[in-house]
């Protein structure tokens, strides 16, 4: 593969683009369980919009981390530290920025299309989503609380409720409660992935929780958010906005307990922490995927 192709594809972080289809599937499942017949065109456009938004934030992140010098000070792991594409091809860094703006434009066009056919109630989600994409790396990572919730907000309420809205034409409690599952899990995913980069991130002005309160204390926040994901499913079942079949997503609790124990023990030992970071990726994907399956079969 040529340098130009790598400069375009690398910053997309293609191996990590599995989250958008899972989150869109949850939104489609909430609409389906609520009695909506799925419009495949709208569903496909929602998926393309979600995927392009994820690529855009990834590419912006790669470009800004290269320009700030962060990429030269991090110790990459399979789950953190960026793709490493731009330090190897510095003369092609502008391709990452082009990719970021091109995919942002694709997201905007799809959003405008849905605004025209579904109405302005979709606008708040769109505005928050665009802000989240554009300013996450440069500004939101300087606020511990916002940096914690911004990733989950993007993949949770914005993707899940946005998909449900373009399919159903309205907001629902089912979509909101279901969206809390990826909200908590994706926030946890980014939180744990910050553990290896504490010193490097501090050097470029970032100010996330592992920097402010330390890794050990951040594990407690991780566990609290993990509990929030499972409590959201139970709350949805108890209030009957989620079907009993959605409880199938609770089977990942055993995996989550293993992860919490592991990261509690190895919070400051990055080499020993890496396997648990991998399990956390599986947890973040599997739990909402099972929730979507439960919603589809529960109708």
Image (spheres, grey):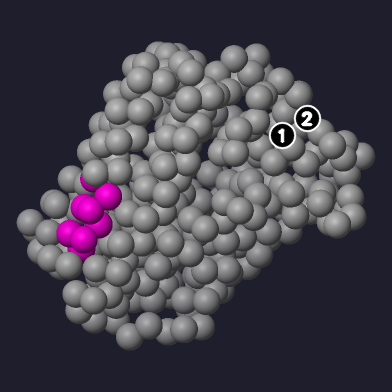
- The answer to whether residue 135 shows anywhere in this view is no
- Seen from this angle, which residue lies furthest left? 238
Q: Is mark 2 on a helix, strand or loop?
A: helix
Q: In this rendering, would 82 be left or right of 160?
A: right
Q: Is residue 222 above or below residue 280?
A: above
Residue in the image at 21% along x and 61% along y: 248
Pick whichever, 265 or 245, lies toward us: 265
Q: What element carries label 1?
A: helix
Decide: few, some or many residues near mark 1? Use Cα within 10 Å; few <14, some 14-19, many ≥20. Answer: some
Q: Are marks 2 and 1 in contact (CB under 8 Å)?
A: yes
| Helix, strand or loop for the magenta stretch, by majority | helix
Residue 229 is inside the magenta segment: no
On the image, which quarter does residue 166 sit in?
Answer: bottom left
Specify the label residue 67 is tagged with.
2
Stretch of the chain drawn in magenta: 246-253
Q: Is residue 104 above or below residue 115?
A: above
Q: In this rendering, would 95 be left or right of 169?
A: right
């Amino acid at each position: 593969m040529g340098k130009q192709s790598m400069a375009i594809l690398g910053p997309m972080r293609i191996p990590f683009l599995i989250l958008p289809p899972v989150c869109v599937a949850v939104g489609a499942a909430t609409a389906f369980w609520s009695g909506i017949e799925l419009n495949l065109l709208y569903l496909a456009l929602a998926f393309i919009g979600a995927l392009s938004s994820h690529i855009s934030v990834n590419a912006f992140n790669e470009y800004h981390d290269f320009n700030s010098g962060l990429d030269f000070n991090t110790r990459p792991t399979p789950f953190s530290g960026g793709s490493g594409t731009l330090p190897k091809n510095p003369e092609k860094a502008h391709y990452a920025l082009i990719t970021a703006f091109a995919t942002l434009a694709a997201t905007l066009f799809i959003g405008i299309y849905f605004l025209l056919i579904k109405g302005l109630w979709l606008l708040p989600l769109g505005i928050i989503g665009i802000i989240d994409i554009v300013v996450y790396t440069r500004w939101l990572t300087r606020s511990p609380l916002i940096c914690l919730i911004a990733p989950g907000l993007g993949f949770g309420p914005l993707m899940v409720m946005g998909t449900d809205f373009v399919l159903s034409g309205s907001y629902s409690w089912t979509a909101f409660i279901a969206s809390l599952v990826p909200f908590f899990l994706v926030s946890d995913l980014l939180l744990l992935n910050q553990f290896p980069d504490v010193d490097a991130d501090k050097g470029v002005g970032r100010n996330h929780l592992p920097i402010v309160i330390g890794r050990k204390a951040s594990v407690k926040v991780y566990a609290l958010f993990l509990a929030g994901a499972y409590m959201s499913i139970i709350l949805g079942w108890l209030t009957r906005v989620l079907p009993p079949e959605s409880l199938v997503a609770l089977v990942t609790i055993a995996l989550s307990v293993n992860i919490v124990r592991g990261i509690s023990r190895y919070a400051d030992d990055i080499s020993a922490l890496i396997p648990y970071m991998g399990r956390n990726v599986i947890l973040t994907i599997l739990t909402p995927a099972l929730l979507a399956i439960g919603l589809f079969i529960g109708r």
